[in-house]
Protein backbone atom coordinates (compact mmCIF):
# COMPACT_ATOMS: atom_id res chain seq x y z
CA UNK A 1 0.00 0.00 0.00
CA UNK A 2 1.50 3.37 -0.97
CA UNK A 3 1.62 6.51 1.19
CA UNK A 4 -1.26 8.24 -0.59
CA UNK A 5 -3.62 5.31 -0.13
CA UNK A 6 -2.75 4.92 3.55
CA UNK A 7 -3.37 8.65 4.21
CA UNK A 8 -6.66 8.42 2.40
CA UNK A 9 -7.68 5.42 4.51
CA UNK A 10 -6.74 7.19 7.76
CA UNK A 11 -8.73 10.28 6.68
CA UNK A 12 -11.78 8.13 5.96
CA UNK A 13 -11.52 6.46 9.39
CA UNK A 14 -11.22 9.86 11.10
CA UNK A 15 -14.26 11.30 9.33
CA UNK A 16 -16.30 8.17 10.09
CA UNK A 17 -15.39 8.40 13.78
CA UNK A 18 -16.35 12.10 14.00
CA UNK A 19 -19.72 11.47 12.31
CA UNK A 20 -20.45 8.55 14.62
CA UNK A 21 -19.57 10.64 17.69
CA UNK A 22 -21.80 13.50 16.51
CA UNK A 23 -24.86 11.32 15.94
CA UNK A 24 -24.38 9.12 19.02
CA UNK A 25 -27.23 9.37 21.55
CA UNK A 26 -26.46 11.41 24.64
CA UNK A 27 -26.78 9.75 28.02
CA UNK A 28 -27.90 11.37 31.22
CA UNK A 29 -24.98 11.73 33.60
CA UNK A 30 -25.48 11.74 37.34
CA UNK A 31 -23.57 14.29 39.36
CA UNK A 32 -20.70 12.80 41.32
CA UNK A 33 -21.60 11.86 44.85
CA UNK A 34 -19.05 11.84 47.63
CA UNK A 35 -18.88 8.78 49.78
CA UNK A 36 -19.52 9.13 53.49
CA UNK A 37 -15.81 8.87 54.24
CA UNK A 38 -14.95 11.67 51.79
CA UNK A 39 -17.68 13.91 53.23
CA UNK A 40 -16.49 13.48 56.80
CA UNK A 41 -12.87 14.02 55.77
CA UNK A 42 -13.82 17.23 53.99
CA UNK A 43 -15.77 18.34 57.04
CA UNK A 44 -12.72 17.89 59.28
CA UNK A 45 -10.37 20.32 57.58
CA UNK A 46 -8.86 22.96 59.90
CA UNK A 47 -10.84 25.77 58.24
CA UNK A 48 -14.19 24.04 58.73
CA UNK A 49 -13.32 23.09 62.29
CA UNK A 50 -12.29 26.66 63.08
CA UNK A 51 -15.58 27.95 61.64
CA UNK A 52 -17.63 25.40 63.56
CA UNK A 53 -15.90 26.17 66.83
CA UNK A 54 -15.16 22.50 67.56
CA UNK A 55 -11.84 22.11 69.39
CA UNK A 56 -9.36 19.87 67.63
CA UNK A 57 -7.99 17.06 69.77
CA UNK A 58 -5.21 14.70 68.90
CA UNK A 59 -4.53 11.49 70.76
CA UNK A 60 -0.89 10.49 71.19
CA UNK A 61 0.18 7.03 72.28
CA UNK A 62 2.27 6.88 75.41
CA UNK A 63 5.98 6.39 74.77
CA UNK A 64 7.69 3.96 77.12
CA UNK A 65 11.22 4.66 78.35
CA UNK A 66 13.97 2.43 76.98
CA UNK A 67 14.78 0.71 80.26
CA UNK A 68 11.42 -1.10 80.15
CA UNK A 69 12.10 -2.66 76.74
CA UNK A 70 12.91 -6.32 77.20
CA UNK A 71 12.03 -6.41 80.89
CA UNK A 72 10.49 -9.52 82.45
CA UNK A 73 6.94 -8.11 82.32
CA UNK A 74 7.23 -7.56 78.55
CA UNK A 75 7.99 -10.83 76.77
CA UNK A 76 7.63 -9.37 73.33
CA UNK A 77 8.65 -9.94 69.78
CA UNK A 78 12.38 -9.51 70.26
CA UNK A 79 12.87 -11.57 73.39
CA UNK A 80 14.93 -14.76 73.14
CA UNK A 81 13.24 -18.12 72.84
CA UNK A 82 14.61 -21.60 73.52
CA UNK A 83 13.08 -24.12 71.13
CA UNK A 84 15.21 -27.15 72.06
CA UNK A 85 14.24 -29.18 75.11
CA UNK A 86 16.63 -28.94 78.07
CA UNK A 87 19.53 -31.40 78.25
CA UNK A 88 17.98 -33.23 81.22
CA UNK A 89 14.99 -34.19 79.09
CA UNK A 90 17.31 -35.62 76.45
CA UNK A 91 19.29 -37.62 79.02
CA UNK A 92 16.16 -39.14 80.50
CA UNK A 93 15.19 -40.51 77.06
CA UNK A 94 18.51 -42.23 76.32
CA UNK A 95 18.03 -45.85 75.35
CA UNK A 96 20.64 -48.47 76.20
CA UNK A 97 20.68 -49.83 72.65
CA UNK A 98 23.42 -48.39 70.48
CA UNK A 99 22.89 -48.48 66.75
CA UNK A 100 26.08 -48.68 64.77
CA UNK A 101 25.79 -47.77 61.12
CA UNK A 102 27.91 -49.76 58.71
CA UNK A 103 30.75 -47.81 57.12
CA UNK A 104 30.03 -46.46 53.65
CA UNK A 105 31.09 -48.77 50.83
CA UNK A 106 34.55 -48.30 49.41
CA UNK A 107 34.31 -46.39 46.13
CA UNK A 108 34.99 -48.51 43.09
CA UNK A 109 36.28 -47.52 39.67
CA UNK A 110 33.65 -47.54 36.93
CA UNK A 111 33.77 -50.29 34.30
CA UNK A 112 36.36 -49.68 31.61
CA UNK A 113 34.94 -47.54 28.80
CA UNK A 114 37.29 -49.09 26.23
CA UNK A 115 36.84 -51.84 23.69
CA UNK A 116 39.91 -53.68 22.39
CA UNK A 117 40.19 -53.58 18.60
CA UNK A 118 43.56 -55.28 18.21
CA UNK A 119 47.32 -55.00 18.76
CA UNK A 120 50.39 -54.27 16.71
CA UNK A 121 54.09 -54.93 17.33
CA UNK A 122 56.89 -52.98 15.65
CA UNK A 123 60.42 -51.80 16.51
CA UNK A 124 59.01 -49.19 18.96
CA UNK A 125 57.22 -51.91 20.96
CA UNK A 126 53.72 -53.22 21.30
CA UNK A 127 50.75 -50.97 20.64
CA UNK A 128 47.10 -51.65 21.41
CA UNK A 129 44.18 -50.29 19.41
CA UNK A 130 41.28 -49.24 21.67
CA UNK A 131 37.90 -47.75 20.92
CA UNK A 132 36.74 -45.00 23.35
CA UNK A 133 33.26 -43.59 22.63
CA UNK A 134 33.51 -42.91 18.88
CA UNK A 135 37.32 -42.50 18.78
CA UNK A 136 39.94 -45.06 17.82
CA UNK A 137 43.07 -44.78 20.00
CA UNK A 138 46.55 -46.28 19.76
CA UNK A 139 48.15 -46.69 23.22
CA UNK A 140 51.44 -47.94 24.61
CA UNK A 141 52.64 -48.66 28.13
CA UNK A 142 52.98 -45.34 29.99
CA UNK A 143 50.35 -43.41 28.00
CA UNK A 144 47.51 -41.50 29.65
CA UNK A 145 44.14 -42.24 28.08
CA UNK A 146 40.96 -40.13 28.42
CA UNK A 147 42.62 -38.03 31.16
CA UNK A 148 41.65 -40.65 33.76
CA UNK A 149 43.52 -43.84 32.87
CA UNK A 150 47.21 -44.68 32.52
CA UNK A 151 48.46 -47.80 30.76
CA UNK A 152 50.45 -49.72 33.38
CA UNK A 153 51.50 -52.88 31.55
CA UNK A 154 50.80 -55.29 28.72
CA UNK A 155 51.44 -58.90 29.72
CA UNK A 156 50.34 -61.51 27.20
CA UNK A 157 46.64 -60.91 26.50
CA UNK A 158 46.08 -58.66 29.52
CA UNK A 159 46.26 -54.85 29.43
CA UNK A 160 46.49 -53.28 32.90
CA UNK A 161 45.10 -49.75 33.30
CA UNK A 162 45.14 -47.54 36.42
CA UNK A 163 42.05 -45.39 37.17
CA UNK A 164 43.69 -42.17 38.40
CA UNK A 165 40.91 -40.58 40.54
CA UNK A 166 40.77 -43.63 42.85
CA UNK A 167 44.24 -45.04 42.11
CA UNK A 168 42.80 -48.48 41.31
CA UNK A 169 44.02 -50.92 38.68
CA UNK A 170 41.75 -52.61 36.15
CA UNK A 171 42.54 -55.20 33.50
CA UNK A 172 41.10 -56.06 30.13
CA UNK A 173 41.70 -58.80 27.56
CA UNK A 174 43.17 -57.43 24.33
CA UNK A 175 43.62 -60.71 22.45
CA UNK A 176 46.70 -62.62 21.36
CA UNK A 177 49.70 -61.00 19.64
CA UNK A 178 49.93 -61.64 15.89
Image (cartoon, rainbow, N blue to C red):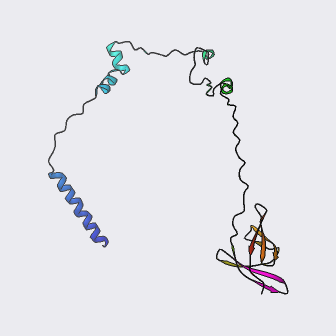
Query: Magenta span: helix, strand or loop, mainly?
Result: strand
Which residue is at a point 65% across and 74% down the rendered structure image?
133
Question: What is the span of residues highlighted in magenta in the rendered image?
Answer: 115-131
| Above or below: residue 76 compared with residue 134 | above
Residue 7 place in picture, x, y as percent? 28, 67
Q: Is residue 71 left or right of residue 107?
A: left
**In x, y percent, where is residue 4?**
28, 71
The residue nearer to you, when weighing 139 against 170, is: 170
Residue 118, quarter of the rendered image: bottom right
Whether the magenta-drawn stretch holds residue 129 is answered as yes
Q: Residue at x 25, y 67 (%)?
A: 8
Q: Is residue 66 above or below residue 152?
A: above
Q: Residue at the spot x=72%, y=57% of the render?
A: 107
| Quadrant hosting residue 15 | bottom left
In the picture, measured across the screen, residue 1 lies left or right of residue 18, that is: right
Q: In terms of image quadrants, where is residue 169?
A: bottom right
* Residue 114 horizontal side relative to residue 49, left or right: right
Farthest residue to the front: give it.
97
Percent of width and height locating residue 156 = 81, 79
On screen, 145 above or below 65?
A: below
Q: Quadrant of the C terminus?
A: bottom right
User: Which residue is painted at 81% across and 85% down in the image?
Assistant: 121
Please state which of residues 34 and 173 is positioned toward the viewer in this rendering: 173
Task: State how many labels appear.
Answer: 0
Query: Within the magenta stretch, is there residue 57?
Result: no
Q: Quadrant of the N terminus?
A: bottom left
Residue sitting nearer the eye, 126 or 6 = 126
Amino acid sequence: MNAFASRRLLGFILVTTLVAAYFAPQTEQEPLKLTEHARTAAARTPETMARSGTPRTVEVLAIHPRDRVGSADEQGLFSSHQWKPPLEAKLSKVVSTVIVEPPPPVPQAPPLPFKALGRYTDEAGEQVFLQYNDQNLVVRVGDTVALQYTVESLDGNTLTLRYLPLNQTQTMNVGAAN
